Image (cartoon, rainbow, N blue to C red):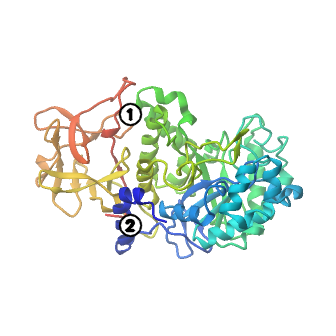
Amino acid sequence: MLLHRMWYLISIQWLFLLASSSIGLIQVRSQEGPLFASSRWIVDGEGRRVKLACVNWPSHLQPVLAEGLNMQPVDNIMELVNDMGFNCVRFTWPLELATKETLASTTVKQMFTWLGLNQSLANITTHNPWVVDLTIADAFETMLERFQQNKLMVVLDNHITVPGWCCGLNDGNGFFGDRFFDPSVWMKGLNKMALLATKFPNVIGMSLRNELRGPKSDVDLWYMYVRQGAETVHAANPNVLVILSGLDYDKDLSFIHKRPVNVSFTGKVVFEHHWYSFSHSGAWKGNLNDACGWISASIMDKAGFIADEDRAPMFESEFGINAQKGDVNDDRYINCFMAMAADQDWDFAVWALQGSYYFREGVVGMDEWYGLLNYEWNDVRNPTWLKRLSSLQKPFRGPEMKQSPTNDGVLFHPQTGLCVLEGKDAGWPLSLGPCNDATGWTYTPQETFLLKGRNQFLQAAGAQKPVQLVKSEPLASRWNQTSNSKLHLSAKAADGIMVCLDVDGVNLVTNECKCLAVDSSCDPTSQWFKLVKSSHI
């Protein structure tokens, strides 16, 4: 099934993606067979980068069944995942699925009847009759088979112990030794799930535990149990990546700075991190340049350094926005997130796929405003958000690709998810377009932007005027990062006025720099640009 409305918005980007193999770009693709951690990259057996562009698909709530089977046939949903440009699913599961036989042996029909979800059961019978009489455990395994048939990679995520919504600070599921979090039971569950995954080469990774948290959190215990969990998974299934989450709702891995995780195996450890607007909710109310600047620095210090220093891959396994209605904090946060995610070229899993739930926190049929899909699971909820997100699905670079110097890259515009390219209109030399089609730039020691392969430089003509290309470096503008976000590019125009790179529709102009400091009410993001290292150029 084609999503015609969505395809209209992003088909040009996908068409270029399909043509990109000629320049050595790894395409968004699924991979069967083991993947490996090589420095900061996830790679295949030949050392080629495989970027995980995943969606979160929950199966950890009280029905313990992949959400959405009451709305659409499962293969239709998986086709939508592929059509939206994703190659991977972070598939969640509760520990009791693997450790509590009375739960695992309950049939789907029995579970939904017990929960009083009679209408959902009737709809599942219509759309996915194959699952109704399966046990919960068999239904989960069959989902893995369907993922494989639909060429989707899978990361299995132990999300919680007792089926239900996650995550409360004192819900008993947060840290080793909590009421519902016995480490020995946890390792038995990991072992069982890792053995199950050996049947499915498309299961390429296992996340040991989601969002460790709570008053019992302790770094020494983290090292002890995370090492044991990692060894347990690797012993049962040496093919899968072993994905480690940090503390404080998976926001903090800062302790890795001075104390690496030592395990008996190599080439399999990946770290994960979560980042939402509410991770720093109060900060987004201030000046956005200041907020983005210090939050980005904090993210790098607490987690981002792991990939940035080539220690291990970083999997941004949860992030997202309210895609249903506008939220000021989300709007501010996501522009900052997009800049960093492109710059760092993280593997990721967006929260979330689901448009609705069977039963969440006592509510039947709850809508999921963060969902990529609409309530009925048959179309995209917010095509504009998906269009922006699509720019992160393709890798900007990788270990086997042509390596560009530090000051070479593409100019990425976080607000749109597009990049700067040469315009086709002589009156507008530069415009925004798909990043795979982007113009390459060198930021020179003279603080000019040189168009790669051409002896042309970026020039600011003046406020509300198109950006120009000039052939003489002495005539070129000197560009500098102006604000604390390090995303404003400013220059002195020919008339002596300081201006910033900006967009007018999709065309590049310069305008008076806005919202540089103090002012918390204005939006600077049309003027945000990031020079992102890229092998596209």
**SS assignment at label 2:** helix
Q: Is 444 above or below relative to 76?
A: above
User: Would residue 473 be found to the left or right of residue 301 on screen?
Assistant: left
Q: What residue type is labelled 1?
A: Asn
Residue 386 image offset from top left, x and y in percent:
45, 52
Q: What residue type is labelled 2?
A: Leu
Q: Residue at x 26, y 32 (%)?
A: 513
Residue 476 image offset from top left, x and y in percent:
15, 47
The answer to which of 440 and 223 lies nearer the viewer is 440
> Residue 43 falls in which quadrant of the image?
bottom right
Q: Residue at x 39, y 37 (%)?
A: 485
Q: Is 380 above or below relative to 171?
A: below
Mark 2 or mark 1, earlier in chain: 2
Residue 350 image offset from top left, x and y in percent:
54, 51
| Residue 310 disc label | none
Q: Residue at x 68, y 56 (%)?
A: 123
| Residue 17 disc label | 2
Name the residue tied to disc 1. 484
